[in-house]
Image (cartoon, rainbow, N blue to C red):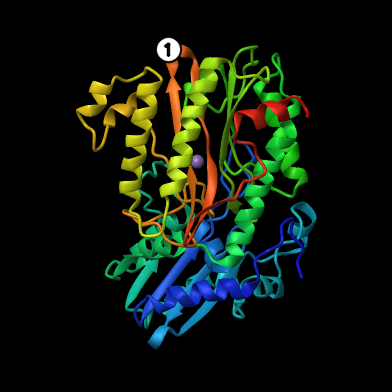
Amino acid sequence: MKTLRYNPIPARFYKTTRDSLAANLPEGALVVVHANDVYPTNADGTMLHHQNADLHYLTGIDQEETTLVMRIGANGQHTDTLLLRETNERIVIWEGARLTKQEATELSGISDVRWSHEYQSLITEAMQSAKFVYWERDTHPRRYTDVQTRNERMFVAFRANYPNAEVRSLYPLLAKMRLVKADPELAQLREACKITGEGFAAILPHIKPGMGEWEMEALLSCEYIRRRSRKFSFLPIIASGPDTCVLHYISNHKVCKDGDLILFDIGAEYGGYAGDMSRTVPANGRFSPRQRAVYEAVLAVHRYAASIMLPGVHKADYERRVRVRMAQELVQLGLLTAQQVEREADDPTCVRKYYMHSVSHSLGLDVHDVCPPDPVFAVGQVWTIEPGIYIPEENLGVRIETDVLIHPDGVEDLIPGAPLEVADIERLMRGA
Ligand SMILES: [Mn+2]
């Protein structure tokens, strides 16, 4: 068996995901899902390969130039073929061994594994009986990019050969399936969250005024990778002082000062699954009265959000109720007036001046995991809870984010290893 940095999910899980997908597709459907490309940088340089999440979800194969082809028969029967980059001695010497057919079968549960040069003949053969084509095409509503993925590129070539094929989107089905996490996925997510929280707690005693944000990034990277994470699950935000109000600050280039807050929005990846956590701490280890007041306000909203995230609740209504609660806190802090809030008591959109994002997103293989357009909370879903208050005129921003699993009677914090309370943060920063 191939050894990996992470403990892989057993192959029977991937067989189950393919069975569920097939059960929701009509007879005569052809499913095609490609790996992501290895993206170029300059000259002969490349970026680290990041697998297509749907391919990972259906096969567990974390390797470039991989393709899953599924042919759906009657009553959810399906014939699956995995195409792999053919390995050779030169690849072994320069890049390290790629999966053998045997290893790919052990990881994915697919017995029919071929080399990728058979791709065209396989598609040609499959199209003789296919009635519908379900091609993996990322149609995430907030996706914006000029770069063509391998799935898109292969689709363009396919379209040229089969201009009349009836092509349908896989995205709605897979988004619905991926929203609810199975037990083996929860094990990976728990590990990603554990690494995320424990690694952060480990660096807290070392933070002090005069430290570069990049030094904190370096310490975190060390704590994550030594716990068998491959990398940050997204570009880490380590923002001090005025940049606590910049939502996606990632340059991490400043030195933090005495009296600054430092906002961390960070996560470790484990086995392809993402942790995502935010904590805001005082550079000198003690919150000022104003910093503390804002922190306690965000924490109160966080607690409220966690208390109303229950199975059956519509996410849109949950977001609205959190805005109502946030408005109370912003009035308390003197940032909004009671009159402003009263005018739109049911949904005080005036909170957007200081709280401009939503409170929760789904979490899984992707940090902002795929999700149907109007989700309803249900058991087995994993969401972030991340309210924030940002006051640029005071150089003061606070975000508190945990990842939670929904149970029948409420949510479970998947990152219990990182402090939430002011007293716990101050104690850990004293090294006590
Ligand atoms: Mn998040």
Can you say whether 320 is above or below 214 in the image?
Answer: below
The residue at the point 47 percent across, 24 percent down is 246
In this rendering, does residue 73 appear at all?
no
Residue lying at the far bottom of the rendered structure: 74
Find residue 196 and report its horizontal and vertical position in percent: 65, 43
Q: Residue at x 58, y 20 (%)?
A: 261
Residue depicted at 36% across the width and 81% down the height: 28
Q: As rendered, which of 144 and 173 lies closer to the eye?
A: 173
Residue 10: % across, % down: 65, 71
Where residue 93 sits, quadrant-wise, is bottom right
Check the image and name the residue furthest to the left.
343
Identify the residue at horizontal 47%, vertical 38% (top origin). Answer: 302
Q: Is mark 1 within 8 Å of ligand 1?
A: no
Q: Does residue 164 appear to the left or right of 85 in the view shown?
A: left
**Which residue corresponds to mark 1?**
393
SS at circle 1:
helix
Pick the residue in front: 63 or 173: 173
Q: Is residue 197 visible?
A: yes
Left or right: residue 226 compared with residue 363: right
Horizontal side of residue 283 vs 299, given as left or right:
right
Q: To which quarter of the image does residue 232 belong?
A: top right
Where is residue 287? Give x, y as percent: 60, 19
In the depicted view, which residue is nearer to us: 188 or 19?
Answer: 188
Q: Quadrant of the C terminus?
A: top right
Residue 41 image-quadrant placement = top right
Residue 121 percent coordinates (x, y): 49, 75
Query: Which image quarter is the N terminus in?
Result: bottom right
